[in-house]
Image (cartoon, helix red, strand yellow):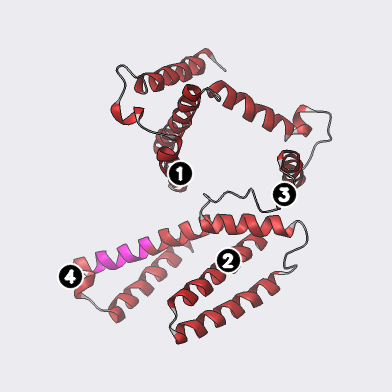
Amino acid sequence: MTDRADAAVSDLLDLMARLRSHDDGCPWDKEQTFASIASYTIEEAYEVADAIARDDMTDLRDELGDLLFQVIFHAQMAKEAGVFDFADIARSVAAKMTRRHPHVFANVQARTAGEQAQAWEEIKDNERQANSKGSDGILSDVPLGFPALTRAVKLSKRAGRVGFVWAQIDEVLTKLHEEVGELEAEIAVGDRARITDELGDVLFVCANIARHLEIDPESALRGSNAKFTRRFEFIERALDADGRTPAQSNLVEMEDLWQAAKAAEKRFHA
């Protein structure tokens, strides 16, 4: 670490310790726990992803700082509890990355990116088995806190390593049609609990499709959200030019404007 980086991290650690000081710290910061700030940590990670998606390097710098501050916050609370500190976190991740890159740090033949990805998962599996309790199942340590689509991919990927997986994408698509049919049947009956259950099955199969295609479903959905936002804003602008709002329009007109937005995007990307 350079002197500049070392000093910056040291200053941040000191700032966090001051915020948590019993004598003159911040009342809000002092009363926080690991559980109470967990949601903020997740939120900051999403804001990092958002800055990356927008290709905004100024925001990315700021959001990475906010995410780093969350790490510092957790480290300070752990230090106060006497369980670990920021240095332990840094040493732990450095040791882990060294283990998982033997082709860089040990006498192992160089790998392609694909080979390294496979080796990474194998090393992780070995670490998991070494650290697991005898009664732990294959899926037991897939974090509950993951976004549901991400966790679905992780669960199916983990099960797939022991052969519980559809071999071909066509089989997954067939399963999707089957699940949609079951959803339609429950919608016709009108049982909300069963509709919810079947909708979950449809989304789980969609996550499996993403896994087969090696596409991150969260990223794909973020892209669709952004596309929906762009096209709806097109509708708003078009109606505003006519002195109206969407509430003063109707579905037929707004659908026509939606198709105009799609056509404009195609011309732009042609």
In three-dimensional space, the C-alpha distance between marks 1 and 4, rounded to whole angstroms, equals 39 Å
Q: Amino acid at mark 3?
A: Ser
Instruction: Give above or below for 188 relative to 70.
Output: below
Instruction: Give above or below for 112 relative to 197.
Output: above
Mark 3 or 4, closer to the camera: 3
Q: Can you say which quadrant of the picture contains the N terminus?
A: top right
Q: Which residue is mark 4?
A: 244
**Mark 4 or mark 1, which is nearer the start of the sequence?**
1
**Mark 2 or mark 3, which is nearer the start of the sequence?**
3
- For the residue labelled by badge 4, is the local secondary structure a helix, a strand or a loop? loop
In three-dimensional space, the C-alpha distance between marks 2 and 4, rounded to whole angstroms, equals 40 Å
- For the residue labelled by badge 2, is the local secondary structure a helix, a strand or a loop? helix
Q: Which residue is mark 1?
A: 42
| Res 204 label | 2
**Mark 4 or mark 2, which is nearer the start of the sequence?**
2
Q: Amino acid at mark 4?
A: Arg
In three-dimensional space, the C-alpha distance between marks 3 and 2, rounded to whole angstroms, equals 26 Å
Q: Quadrant of residue 192?
A: bottom left
Q: Residue at x 75, y 30 (%)?
A: 104
Q: Which residues are magenta?
A: 229-238
Mark 1 or 4, closer to the camera: 1
Give the class, few, some or many, for how many residues have Cα within 10 Å of label 4's Cα (few <14, many ≥20): few
In three-dimensional space, the C-alpha distance between marks 3 and 1, rounded to whole angstroms, equals 30 Å
Do the residues bearing badges 3 and 4 touch, measured as CB atoms within 8 Å? no
**Mark 1 or mark 3, which is nearer the start of the sequence?**
1
Q: Amino acid at mark 1?
A: Ile
Q: Amino acid at mark 2?
A: Phe
- For the residue labelled by badge 3, is the local secondary structure a helix, a strand or a loop? loop
| Res 135 label | 3
Q: Residue at x 30, y 75 (%)?
A: 254
